[in-house]
Amino acid sequence: MRPQDEAPDFTRECVNLANARLGALALATSDDFFAPMERMLDAREPVFIPDKYDDNGKWMDGWESRRKRVPGHDWCIVRLARPGRLHGVDFDTRHFTGNYPPGASLEGCYLRDGDPGAATEWFELLPRVPLQGNSHHYHALDGARPVSHVRLNIYPDGGVARLRLYGRPEFDPARRDDDGLVDLASALNGAVALIANDEHFGRVGNLLLPGRGVDMGDGWETRRRREPGHDWCLLALAGPGVIEAIEVDTAHFKGNYPARCSLQAAHSPSGDLQALVAQAENWPLLLPEQTLQMDLQHYFREQIRAHGPVTHVRLNIFPDGGVSRLRLRGRPA
């Protein structure tokens, strides 16, 4: 168990494949009397509303089963947003204090089609581990086998605010757009937001989500800059590739969109974040500075500079503001 500010590297280097925004779905549970299983996959941070109750009792932001009065334990089956290899899990029990499970374990299966049934063979991903209330519980997974579904077991009952399963999605280069390109900046393909110099109003990982932003909170937005310079973020692509089409979407950002943006890129085998950050400022330009407008999808092709395969990009915004989505469509190397 580690506090949020000491989250392990896999939370930064991998995609949360249990994210409902990416398409993860809670399929079945033994019991969700107090709080429905779907809430456990919400991409937003869990909240606690002291005076909120519903017909079954205290409203809780997560999955919560009733108090078990018979032998056994409760469970929930989740279909991942995309099959992949899991490298870490976070059992998040925030706001669950006298009603958290004392223990949890995790199983997986891999199905090319359909969902698990009575005959499905499950394999162990993580043996039973102890849980505490109102805490993150990070555990590394070996990623040895691909997984399409997981079964979370809690012992014997109780509530889990969020289940996050960090992994690398199966990347299928054959899954291309009509023009033969692949969005190498899509979280569903395995792209990861590594770091941003500021995320005051919106997380940088939102840039990689599918679809357009639903509101101004569904993007990357920095605070108002009161000093010289500009804001930036660093992204790891789904795989090496040559970028041929770029989209910068400022959906819902009207009085707070950046005046301009640019992109730098490089092919870097380094997994060291500090080294990447230090080098990125000097990477070659992929897209020179471009003027942006409010609440608009901006498309760039001929402005892209010639380059070989790249693995990482740095998005610069001038001087600050919000961007909803970034699409980097190209040909995998």
Image (spheres, rainbow, N blue to C red):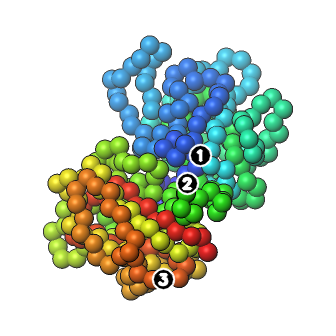
Q: As rendered, which of 176 and 151 lies closer to the eye?
A: 176
- Residue on which disc 2 sits: 188
Q: Is residue 160 left or right of residue 172?
A: left
Q: CA distance from mark 2 to mark 3?
A: 25 Å
**Element at badge 3?**
loop
- Residue 187: x %, y % from top left: 52, 56
Residue 201 drawn at (x, y percent): 28, 54
For discs 2 and 3, the disc positioned in front in the rendered view: 3
Percent coordinates x, y for residue 263 in the rendering: 37, 74
Identified at 58% across, 80% down, the residue is 269
Q: Quadrant of residue 160?
A: top right
Residue 307 badge: 3
Q: Is residue 170 above or below residue 28?
A: below
- Classify mark 1: residues with Cα within 10 Å, few (<14), some (14-19) or many (20+): many
| Residue 107 visible, this angle | no
Instruction: Say if 243 sits above or below 207 in the image.
Output: below
Query: Which marked residue is nearer to the observer: mark 1 or mark 3?
Result: 3
Q: Which residue is mark 1?
A: 81
CB contact under 8 Å: marks 1 and 3: no
Q: Are marks 2 and 1 in contact (CB under 8 Å)?
A: yes
Circle 1 SS class = strand
> Mark 3 is on which residue type?
His
Q: In what quadrant of the picture does the C terminus appear? A: bottom right
Is 5 positioned to the left or the right of 86 in the image? left
- Graded by Cα atoms within 10 Å as few (under 14), some (14 to 19) or many (20 or more), the crowding at tag 3 reads some
Q: Residue at x 71, y 49 (%)?
A: 147
Q: Amino acid at mark 1?
A: Ala
Is residue 12 rendered to the left or right of residue 225?
A: right
- How many neighbours does mark 2 have within 10 angstroms: few (below 14), some (14-19), or many (20 or more)? many
Residue sitting at 41 percent across and 85 percent down? 284
